[in-house]
Amino acid sequence: MATRRGSARARTYAAAGVDRSQTSRALAALLAQVRVRHPSGEVRSVPLPGHFAGLVRVGRETLAVTTDTVGTKTILAEATGRWEEVGVDAVAINVNDLAAVGARPIGLVDVISCRRAEPSVFAQLGRGIDRGLREAGCILLGGETAIVPELLAGVDVGGTAVGYFPRGRRPVTGASIRPGDWILGLRADGLHSNGFTLARRIVRDAHADWNRPRPGARRALAVEFLTPTRIYVRASEALAGVPGVTGLAHISGGGVRNLPRLHGRVRYVLDGWPAPAGLFDWLGRTGDVSATELYQTFNMGIGFVAIVRPRAFAVALRRLRRAGYADARVVGHVARGHGVELPHLGVEYTGYA
Amino acid sequence: MATRRGSARARTYAAAGVDRSQTSRALAALLAQVRVRHPSGEVRSVPLPGHFAGLVRVGRETLAVTTDTVGTKTILAEATGRWEEVGVDAVAINVNDLAAVGARPIGLVDVISCRRAEPSVFAQLGRGIDRGLREAGCILLGGETAIVPELLAGVDVGGTAVGYFPRGRRPVTGASIRPGDWILGLRADGLHSNGFTLARRIVRDAHADWNRPRPGARRALAVEFLTPTRIYVRASEALAGVPGVTGLAHISGGGVRNLPRLHGRVRYVLDGWPAPAGLFDWLGRTGDVSATELYQTFNMGIGFVAIVRPRAFAVALRRLRRAGYADARVVGHVARGHGVELPHLGVEYTGYA
């Protein structure tokens, strides 16, 4: 469970070991101390409330920077000896946050903190990082390996991605989202890398076998959980700069409650967001988790969202399909009001995520 | 103990729990897998062998990216409840690596992984980050807090810094270093954030009291250890682009063996590098650590180095003093051959760091 700056959701995830309101208070305490501005006229910070990417203008370029870690998904990687997926994730979680502001990835630095650097583990991580970078169309800019046996009980894998805006492209911020816009969703490939603390607790409490498939699945539960985060860079490249594309969102920790971060003074009516299905349905029923908790913890099948004016809908869909996202479809619309609603499921959130 | 990419030193630090040759093999295994290139003609990687900063050209700007973690120094922060120093370090260790290529810092993203986010700890970290950013003249671009109680035994603090080259300035690579150049050294403020695994082991094995000063010191040992890493950005700003300045180096993990990374086909004769003094002397004698091990583990009193042509010496020294580094002085010269030598101490290294 990772909380990125700006994310100030105060929910009770405490039962699974993560106290979000405590984390929010801690973050606020940190940020209250940092008030420095850049002394050089050449560098200007670009405010981007509600996004996980930080934007800064340097000379003629605008850069976007994101940082995130894979979190406790590595515990499953360690248990199964499968690390390639986590390598993909280290890239995906960061470039998807760039994609959500319409920035094109330049590259990534990775950070691996561990008790001991196993060459076979690192080779798999490298294979995954390479896969992720190829899919995202960017390069490895550097990295750091910290061998800190006294600090780590497991392996912590993260990274920082830097992106830019090609000539003429402006950041997609969500500021122009308005009632009447349509919400397009792109399929997620499973859990991605969010909600693992809760998901693993559900498996443990149910005494489910990690090495066997859940009912209705073909792959072992551990392998299904490890499916890498889908990369949405080509979707962002297909849509950024297209007139009428008003918002993009990476559905990560916080689930559908990521949407009000884009623009808080509208209501997101997600009447086409999938009902709990497959792994998500199994997790909800096995763990007796309410729909309200499910949709604010997991992506529930949609990993990336584009918000568009009705007139831009056809061109956006065509561009997404041409970019390889044949699964793109309408999952809702923007209405007057505030908060998020899944009317077919009786779920509603009024506050910010 | 952190190993950054490119750092391939194969030494036996294993007794203190860090197997560097294993780490080197693991890194090589990872890097062998990553061969991707950027598909866009707008982005070009700039090879910079031997440096911790990665360089990339985007449009008209050249960017430098560094990433590093504070490592096990946080164990002392936790034991003493003092976190501000570690906040400074998170900035310093990264911007100093930018300084070593002559890049001006734009900003930092911080990453804090912990079991629980304590507001009082985060406030102190924020105060330190702010102090570091002010000193380095850059801003906070974002951050990530990972609450991962199952992964972490302590608190892991790190960051990624992004820098640029102001119009007309080129990276300082060390490629033009040649015999006859002089080596200027700038004072370190204690251990900085390297060698803590060994240093803490020495204290533990000697049953020394963290809460009392060592002989000859005034501050408690723990407080002396926690002294933040000095920031050398103004030194780099004073020297980068000055004709005759051929190399800059941040003396971090690996001690004086960082120098051959700049240029491997010359010999660094460090006849003016300080003999073990103060804390370093105490560590060496208390831990019965050889001078050879000391000078390849700790900075031994010099945290940043500038290599200059003799004709540039006077102007470099004047500029450094004007920038606030009154302590700058000659610590050696470049000769024919290879490796590093401290002739007054009978210490010599022949291989790469």
Image (spheres, coloured by chain):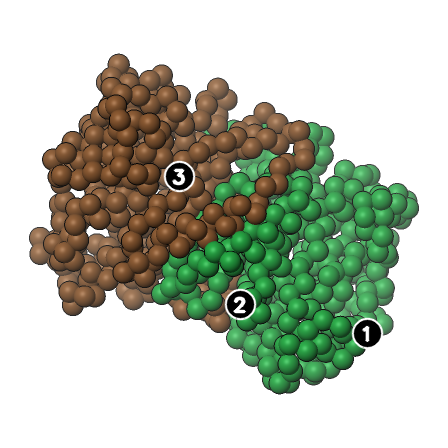
Chain colours: A brown, B green
Residue in the picture at 43% in, 51% down: A25
Residue B194 to residue A167: above or below: below
- Determine if marks 1 and 2 fall on one subunit: yes
- Residue beneath label 2, please? B78
* Residue B350 percent location from the top left of the image: 71, 67
Please state, as top left, top right, bottom left or bottom right, where the N terminus of chain A lies in the image: bottom left
| Whether residue B244 can be seen here | yes
**Left-right relation of B272 to B211:** right
**Along the line of sight, which residue is nearer the eye, B298 or A6?**
A6
Which amino acid type corresponds to the residue marked 3 in the rendered image?
Answer: Asp
| Whether residue A125 can be seen here | no
Residue B208 to residue B133: above or below: below
Please state, as top left, top right, bottom left or bottom right, where the C terminus of chain A lies in the image: top left
Residue B247 to residue A345: above or below: below
- Determine if marks 3 and 2 fall on one subunit: no
| Cα gap from disc 3 to disc 1, whole angstroms | 52 Å
Residue under mark 2: which chain is it in? B
**Left-right relation of A327 to A136:** left
* Residue B195 percent location from the top left of the image: 63, 68
Which amino acid type corresponds to the residue marked 1 in the rendered image?
Answer: Leu
Which label was assigned to residue B275?
none
Q: What secondary structure is marked by label 3?
A: helix
| Cα gap from disc 1 to disc 2, whole angstroms | 36 Å
Residue in the picture at 33% in, 27% down: A265
* Residue A133 percent location from the top left of the image: 41, 43
Number of numbered labels in the structure image: 3
Which label was assigned to residue A97?
3
- Residue beneath label 1, please? B345
